[in-house]
């Protein structure tokens, strides 16, 4: 069954909210803080289920970090709408700061004796 395509103008209006600086900043903040939010949404729920006490002591600071970083990135994205050299610098910084799938923190399982890049360096020398 062929997909029903919207006219060009309607497609542009449908995508417009996804390119708003607030939406882009929230997405970037989630990508940047993936190491914090990942354990909260992981299927094994090791972080939250093995806590002694309230889970809000872990969840609320992460939400605050995401909101604050989203606000900061939103301000930078609004600044990037103006002059061309500043736009290039801001977008380059955003793209260079994205986490890579092969970052050192993801190479070792959490339970291994070498679980951080710093400890990996100490064990290798």
Image (cartoon, helix red, strand yellow):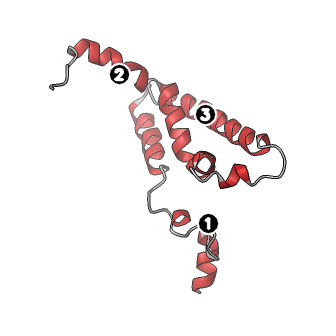
Mark positioned earlier in the residue sequence (1 or 2): 2
Spatial CA distance of label 1 from label 3 is 30 Å
Is residue 61 depicted above or below 12 in this figure?
A: below
How crowded is the residue under tag 2: few (<14 C-alpha within 10 Å), some, or many (20+)? few
How crowded is the residue under tag 3: few (<14 C-alpha within 10 Å), some, or many (20+)? few
Is residue 80 depicted above or below 29 in this figure?
A: above
Which residue is labeled 2 in the image?
A: 15
Mark positioned earlier in the residue sequence (3 or 2): 2
Is residue 56 depicted above or below 6 in this figure?
A: below
Residue ID at (28%, 18%): 11
Quadrant housing residue 124: bottom right
Residue 112, image x, y percentages = 61, 74
For mark 1, give the secondary structure.
Answer: loop
Q: Residue furthest right?
A: 53
Spatial CA distance of label 1 from label 2 is 39 Å
Which residue is labeled 3 in the image?
A: 72
| Residue 91 tag number | none
């Amino acid at each position: 069954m062929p997909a029903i395509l919207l006219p060009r103008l309607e497609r542009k209006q449908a995508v417009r909210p996804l390119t708003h600086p607030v939406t882009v900043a929230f997405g970037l903040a989630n990508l940047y803080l993936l190491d914090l939010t990942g354990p909260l949404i992981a299927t094994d729920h090791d972080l939250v289920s093995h806590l002694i006490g309230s889970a809000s002591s872990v969840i609320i600071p992460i939400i605050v970090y995401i909101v604050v970083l989203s606000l900061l990135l939103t301000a930078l994205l609004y600044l990037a709408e103006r002059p061309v050299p500043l736009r290039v610098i801001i977008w380059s910084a955003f793209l260079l700061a994205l986490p890579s799938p092969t970052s050192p923190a993801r190479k070792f399982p959490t339970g291994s004796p070498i679980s951080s890049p710093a400890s990996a360096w100490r064990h290798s020398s």
